[in-house]
Image (tube, rainbow, N blue to C red):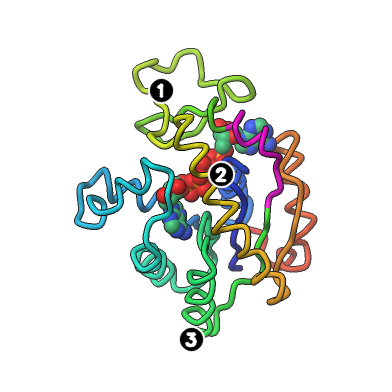
Amino acid sequence: MRLALFGPPGAGKGTQSMLLKKRFGLDVISTGNLIREAIQEGTDVGRSVEKYVNAGDLVPDHLVRDLANQAMAEHKFDRFILDGYPRTTTQAKWLREFLDAYKAPIEAVISLKVSPEAVVDRLSNRRINKDTGESYHMIYHPPPSDLDPALIVRRSDDTPHAIKARIDVYRRETQPVEEFFRSEGILIEISGEGEVSDVFNRILSSIEHIAELELV
Ligand code: AP5
């Protein structure tokens, strides 16, 4: 099974990817996480992309493509969920060519629809456990009370300025990619609003035709 989760910042791509991972035993390939790891490790790629991420801009296409392609190859081109890739039309075309060469096309792109107000609420209330990467929402999914407060941090691009930039970039560069997936016949649009479990159930219903043989 090869899926992609698509949607604006804060749509719930990471949250839902983790639930799909648990349900189907799929690996999550998150270009955002790969980029943050590269920054933390201080690699050449990490050093060159930090300024884009902190400003809420997209990282240059070819750098993200290399990270994503390497991860898909490591997963032998199967049983993965792409989280946050592709997000430009150029990336989408490269991805199709790359996977076609291995006869391993993406089977469904799940596009999570959320209002701009929900995006701002979710990102401004998000906190991360800096040790485990676990994500919280200060109101709907607060960190456990026994967790050391020093471990609870805000992501560097969850500042008001970067959130606004990410939303603008999404509208300008990423949203148009939906048209590409629609024309390929693999776009599934669902509401990303409401309880996390409700969103997950909607996703499960929408991929029943792909998923029924692959439960683990
Ligand atoms: P990335 O890490 O992919 O960030 P993003 O797309 O902005 O998405 P987020 O991780 O912010 O949100 P999400 O949709 O995963 O939501 P989540 O589940 O965490 O990318 C970061 C940066 O890396 C980019 O800005 C760019 O610079 C670069 N980059 C990455 N990929 C790239 C690419 N392909 N090309 C170029 N550059 C790239 O949820 C958010 C919050 O909401 C959490 O607190 C969560 O607990 C809460 N929440 C989730 N679901 C619900 C719900 N149903 N109800 C209430 N709260 C909820």
Q: Looking at the image, which is closer to me, 216 or 72? A: 72
Task: Tell me if 101 is positioned left or right of 61 in this view.
Answer: right
Q: Which residues are magenta?
A: 112-122
Q: Quadrant of the C terminus?
A: bottom right
Q: Residue 101, labelled with which disc?
A: 3
Report if residue 127 lies within the magenta region: no
Q: Which residue is mark 2?
A: 167
Q: Position of residue 104 (x, y in %)?
A: 55, 79
| Looking at the image, residue 107 lies above or below residue 97 | above
Q: Secondary structure at mark 1?
A: strand
Q: Looking at the image, which is closer to me, 41 or 175? A: 175
Q: Earlier in the sequence, mark 1 or mark 2?
A: 1
| Looking at the image, residue 65 lies above or below residue 129 | below
Q: Position of residue 142 (x, y in %)?
A: 56, 21
Distance between mark 2 and mark 3 Cα atoms: 33 Å
Mark 2 is on which residue type? Answer: Ile
Q: Which residue is mark 1?
A: 152
Q: Position of residue 92 (x, y in %)?
A: 53, 71
